Image (cartoon, rainbow, N blue to C red):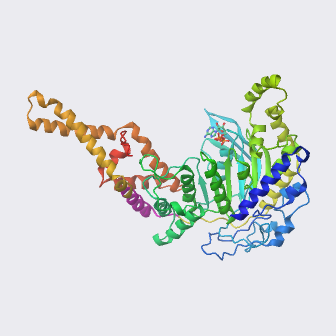
Amino acid sequence: MEDIQSQSDLYRSSSSSASSPTSRVPSSHFFYVRKPGSLTQPISFEDSPEWEDTDDADVRMDEEANIGGGGDSINDATATPISPSLSKINSGSMTSPPVVPEGGGTVVRKIAGASIAWKDLTVTMKEKRRYSDKVVKSSNGYALPGTMTVIMGPAKSGKSTLLRALAGRLPPSAKMYGDVFVNGSKSHMPYGSYGYVERETQLIGSLTVREFLYYSALLQLPGFLCQKSSVVEDAIQAMSLSDYANKLIGGGDCYMKGLRSGERRRVSIARELVMRPHILFIDEPLYHLNSVSTLLMMVTLKKLASMGCTLVFTIYQSSTEVFGLFDRICLLSNGNTLFFGETLACLQHFSNAGFPCPIMQSPSDHFLRAINTDFDRIIAMCKNWQDDNGDFSAVNMDTAVAIRTLEATYKSSADAASVETMIFKLTEREGSQLKSKGKAGAATRVAVLTWRSLLVMSREWKYYWLRLILYLILTLFIGTLYSGLGHSLSSVAARVAAVFVFVSFASLLGIAGIPSLLKEIKIYRSEASNQHSGAFVFILGQFLGSIPFLFRLVDVLCPLHVPIG
Ligand SMILES: Nc1ncnc2c1ncn2[C@@H]1O[C@H](COP(=O)(O)OP(=O)(O)OP(=O)(O)O)[C@@H](O)[C@H]1O
């Protein structure tokens, strides 16, 4: 944690120095000082990569290799991972990877990450029978074990599409060109070797964090029940959720107070961690988070990366503090790569292109300010103000020109060349292929779904009773409407029963309840990703779970929700 703090502090000091007019092109000092905790060289992976359960995992880093990787120029700094032993990265021959954090010492790594490199990656989307313009255009980049690589850019710049392309999760309407290499090989990542966290994930509110992760592990992983608990505890710890492990997730449709959005987001990441992935892709980990939750999330992810996991995620914007935690940045605008490299070198790139970061401005704000075409309207407005109020040069920048300049500067820069060199090094030899960890069997999944369904229903039982009471009152009310008209008591009772049945069935068909069912399907789909028998198992599990509690069907489909305080 101290390492992470000092890395962030170092970044802050360097970025503010870079902002000073006289030192907008920062002195070499800022770029050559290795960020504490960052890697100069990727960690190699083992033949059978697994998360280590013990503290004496053998993935250690060698200080000398780190120092040797230091360069004499910004480009060298960008390319510090290149070292004589780099060719071994994908060979699997380095079982004790020789890399180290700044400041010396030995870092114990528990996760064997995997390298991922992409070359000339282009994606187009099919829109109304024809393919759109390229959403991602000839993107090059890489992500290394033990590092955080962030894909950043304005809205609709292609961040999520690039992330999905890397994870092999593009929709069927997309066409992808170019190559993605994992550990130097083009093969697909097998089930369980990577995790993908969607921007908006669904959780089951009436379960505690630990229960939710435990059932998720049971649904995803093969093996015995007792083996799953250590996996779950590791995921809870990795996502700093120990204080919340026994708390209800809450929220959503279950009307129970529960976790706040930052904690919920970490639970959704923890759910992927139960698979012990080597690479973790996250679409907008900071989505809808306040600044405190944002910092906690990023520090937690940094900790996870420092354990060896390869982290790749998208982000729209970040504070200076958070920005300092990233290792590499891929800056996109309208699908074009405006920069790929170390975060500190990105500041230098903007300076080189004639857009130095102004004093007191967050680098991330500055980058987006320069490349977000949405600012054009505001610029036009500011120009009018400028006439009245004098020079307003901080925002007087033509975005389209800025984008073109940055793109051209990057293409001809040594940064782009060093990325290509790095990709070549990462792909010249195929490394050990990631292996599937296996899947939970269909019978296990049916049993777990049934049991989970029963548990959820038992937790929400009081709401079913309340609903039932409401129905009874309603039917009594309607049924007794006729009691003054001279009908016999038995015919009124029959009417009450008939209306009760009618209201219940009407509720079953309630269209407004369908989203809850879709939510449950979505949760299961992300738990059982890549499992072809998923749909059948889900239906069977839900059906079996519903038999003892017919009200459950009413709850899933009923448009009437009873808010409980
Ligand atoms: N499934 C799809 N079908 C058609 N077009 C799509 C699809 N997904 C994305 N696009 C288009 O691709 C472009 C880039 O979208 P993408 O979601 O990758 O951008 P983004 O940078 O992640 O944006 P945001 O942060 O606003 O989500 C957009 O113009 C979008 O309309």
Q: Is residue 94 visible?
A: yes
Up/down of 302 relative to 523, above or below:
below
Q: How many marks?
A: 0
The percent position of residue 148, horizontal first and vertical second, equals: 71, 57
Tell me if residue 124 comes above or below residue 377 in the rendering.
Answer: below
Q: Position of residue 423 (x, y in %)?
A: 79, 57
- Which residue occupies the foreground of this view, 126 or 75? 75
Residue 246 on image: x %, y %: 47, 62
Q: Quick check: is 301 in the magenta stretch?
A: no
Q: Residue furthest bottom?
A: 56
Image coordinates for residue 441, horizontal then vertical, percent: 46, 64
Name the residue located 37 percent from the left edge and 46 percent from the top edge. 564
- The kind of secondary structure the magenta stretch mainly shows is helix
Q: Nearer the viewer, residue 44 or 384?
A: 384
Judging depth in this view, the residue of 157 and 27 nearest the camera is 27
Question: What is the magenta range?
Answer: 439-454
Which corner quadrant of the figure contains ligand 1? Answer: top right
Which quadrant: the N terminus? Answer: bottom right
* Residue 119 appears in the rendering: no
Task: Identify which residue is drawn at 30% across, 54% down.
Answer: 547
